Amino acid sequence: MSGVNRISGAGRLTPARTARFTFDGRTLTALEGDTVASALLSHDIHLVGRSFKYHRPRGILSAGAEEPNALLDVSRDAARRQPNVRATVQEVFDGMKVASQNRWPSLSFDVGSFNDFLSPFFAAGFYYKTFMWPKAAWHKLYEPFIRRAAGLGVTPTEPDPDHYASRYVHCDVLVVGAGVAGLAAALAAAKAGAKVIVCDEQGEVGGALHHDIGTVIDGKPGYGWAQQTGKALAAMDNVTLLTRTTAFGYYNHNFVALVERVTDHLAAVDETLPRERLWQVRAKKVILANGSIERHMVFANNDRPGIMLASAGRTYLNHFGVAVGKRVGIYTAHDSAYEAAFDLKRAGVAVPVIVDCRQKPGEAVLEEARNLGIEVLTGHSVVDTSGKLRVASISVARNGGGGQRKIAVDALLVSAGWTPSVHLFSQSRGKVKFDAATERFLPGIYAQECLSVGACNGTDDLQATIDEALAAGELAARAAGAKGGAQVALNGRNAFEWTGGMIGAAEGAGADKTVKAFIDFQHDVCAKDIRLAVREGMHSIEHIKRFTTNGMASDQGKLSNMHGLAIAAEALGKEIPAVGLTTFRQPYTPVTFGTIVSHSRGSLFDPARKTPMHAWEEAQGAEFEDVGNWKRAWFYPKAGETMHEAVARECKTVREVAGVFDASTLGKIEVVGPDAAKFLNLMYTNAWDNLKPGRCRYGIMLREDGFIYDDGVVGRLAEDRFHVTTTTGGAPRVLQHMEDYLQTEFPHLKVWLTSTTEQWAVIAVQGPKAREIIAPLVEGIDLSNEALPHMSVAEGRICGVPARLFRMSFTGELGFEVNVPADYGQAVWEAIWARAEPMGACAYGTETMHVLRAEKGYIIVGQDTDGTVTPDDAGLSWAVSRKKPDFVGIRGLKRPDLVRDGRKQLVGLLTKDPKVVLEEGAQIVADPNEPKPMTMLGHVTSAYWSPNCGRSIAMALVAGGRARLGQTLYVPMADRTIAVEVSDMVFFDKEGGRLNG
Amino acid sequence: MLLIYCPYCEEERSELEFRNGGDAHIARPTNMAEISDEEFEAYFFLRDNPKGVIFERWRHIHGCGRFFNAARDTVSDRFIATYRAGEPKPVLDAEPKTPATVETYEALEGAAQ
């Protein structure tokens, strides 16, 4: 049995095809093709949730994407669970579990509904006024309370097991919506030979033809014509027809994002299919045919379960074969709702009354109502409703006052008319215009290559819609360059012409401050809340929106915005266009994070860069640290060693014997050309003309403002060839910086720049035995101090592989950096290691590298500098040429603030207690007893335990630092104050003799 | 996502391939070391941030790697023209004034000021 409300012979589903699902634990049978909403209604279930603020019982309001009430928790299994699913969109599949939300202990008895009685305390903007004092209550009381109350559903806790796909596609014409207008436009564009994509959010094409059975197109019933046309389109080579696909965002340059729901409606998930697919479409022309959305009537207690949109009532009857009640009343300001009454009446459902707030509805619908024997009360309004968990009766009164008549109903279909869906048009930055005659916003000025057709363009008449859509389809195809084929002609007619519509509160919603006449169901915003906002001084619609939260729920005010605007305009005494419309934003309907993230998760979220020696390092048990995207060996613990012990051992071993270090991540740029030296003169503070081939120099790169940007050793291989190194993290931006100047400021220089970072594997061999380790492996290079002194470079072979051998040191020891083509990196490393290990040398990681360089006072750009440090601040003024007429930063260095006294300068700090290691980032003061806020002199930039000095060492930026040598300063911490002495930055081998072995 | 015509590759490519490089047509003074504080301020710090047409630099960083210039409308993000570095500013047609039928809040806010 697929439901007591299922009417045999009605609807388009096949009775034999059933699916079973549970709702709050109760097993129910649905028909294949049902939405959760139609299946629940077939079992006469209207109550599906509790409202957000007042916990009022709520039912299914619509039959589409605009649904504000019926938000349910839908799961397939423990991991595949999604909260806040719109019951009107989600199709039923066999085995589905559905649960209601925002209620405790149960849907029919909800403790939270107490809020409804407290509602005077929850007036609009209450959260701006309450919870203000006492201040201390925030943490313990208010915030936990608000957090518990906030949000409707419960987020899943397990990782999402599904996968998602993403696709880029170009087309001539993208048609959004596959109702009458969309299908006609797509047909015309496709027949003209254009490459067409048509998408529609529903499971089948047809749009409003789902409910409107009075439409005949090309001599066929509208829905049948739509299916036939959809099939014909799908069969064409130049057409992609996507159903269950929502165009959710219209971005720049006709870039439209679509989400296709691929598996959410299937009982058995095919693991080879993505759950959802993101289509990123770039269309030459876009045709918007996204229809219109029916508005509800705003009157007292209009939110009881059983009160729903008239078109929804028609959809459930005409498409799903479900009557939404046994005694269904109608309350309308628009002729379209009459057809709901006619359809229900003909299906055998009692329709006790049509209440129409207008004096003069359309003649044709009035006559048909009379023919069918339905009572029509024109010039009347529904002024109240009753019923605890479902509407039981309506109270009707003549407009302008008079006696009330109570009419028993078990459902009430309402319509205040139709709002053209200008969401995507507005997202495209088109400007809407207000049509005063029909009280609706319509597309006005187009900002992009798109056309609106049909209901979303305010075109009401069916033949006019068809003609407009056919013309637009052909025009778009021609404009996109299509040259083919035949023109299309179609004719269509409606059962009735529709007139009417209203926006704002109906009679009986009243000016009463206590009446709850809802405009925004999802956020519990009533007509009175808008008026209150205006009284409290909100005059802009954007302020009214935020104060009341009208239109801010996940339905984004699809039903409520126009009503809210009209009530605000009335309260402000302004015309509607003068109040203004809030801006439509992407996405049109909620989009899952999975769709947006797609494959970019887990190991594909951010690629890892690995050096050529990575596998060896891993095999040696190295711990790694992330430096940008690089994985760098951090330290190499031996069995049982802590990090501290491993680093201490590595530090001692390098200075006593030698160490081998993977420096491959250093940025490398080959600067080549007759003007290479001239170019480097401009890019670095140093002078390069006088650097002889075969020698190296430490270079500092500034920005134009005079602050240190990067540093590195530059080797000159030939008159016209330099091997530039950069910091590991700085390589891309340094190349960009160089390219920028070369291309735009110094294009007359003949220079080529090539990134060679990943071309070279770099093996640093440092320590007293460094030369002895590599000597037997090197061919063609004299390694003596005389032939290859500190800061020189030579090309030759190592292990038979072409190599650039640098004699340089970032440790203060005798050192070499072996550069070999990346593919040989691991082999050469292993050859070096085979010599180093028996001598007692070690492999060391970045932590030891940091300690050793700090022992020597070598800076790290980005750690000891922060973008506000000049070369002089860092004690590097010796590296700034005073003879060059120009270099980047030369003028910045002369700015008054950069040459004033008292700037922060880089100095060393020695703690009075040598065992205490400072915290990097800790602040430094002169007087530890100064009342707060204390005068802060600077901060610690680097701090380590130095195994070679046998004490803690630190570097710090301190105001007037170099003039404070020998002074005692203080580092106040949370639990104690640490006394430090200012020193120079060289803590080990002050004479530098070890560089020569 | 913008679609940008690279004047070197001579085709429209997705914004993903490009990086913005700030205002165009700001030449670095050739006598850099000698300019006054005011001249340096004007060269390095001061920019217009116009509502409307801006001339700006772009680099086709994941394509040909070249810097080029573009005239873009900062309101609509429409590219009016792109041209190679070193070429003079193109002469642009006068932008049609948007008629006053705009109802979004941003437009009204502009009118209120």
Image (cartoon, coloured by chain):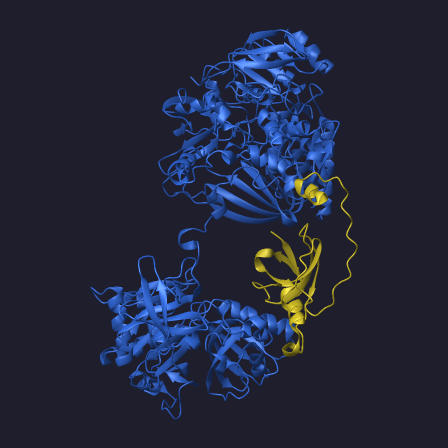
Chain colours: A blue, B yellow
A820 lies above or below A731: below
Query: What residue is rendered at 51% in x and 36% in y?
Result: A128
Query: What residue is rendered at 46% in x and 33% in y?
Result: A84
Q: As rendered, which of A610 and A978 lies closer to the eye?
A: A978
The image position of residue B13, as x and y in percent, is 62, 57
- Residue A56 in view (yes/no): no
| The N terminus of chain A - image quarter | top left
Left or right: where does residue A840 sit relative to residue A396? left
- Residue A670 in view (yes/no): yes
Left or right: where does residue A446 sit relative to residue A906? right
A348 lies above or below B97: above
Give the quadrant of residue A161: top left
Q: As rendered, which of A989 and A607 lies closer to the eye?
A: A989
The image position of residue A425, as x and y in percent, is 66, 40
Give the quadrant of residue A897: bottom right
Query: What residue is rendered at 72% in x and 40% in y?
Result: B102
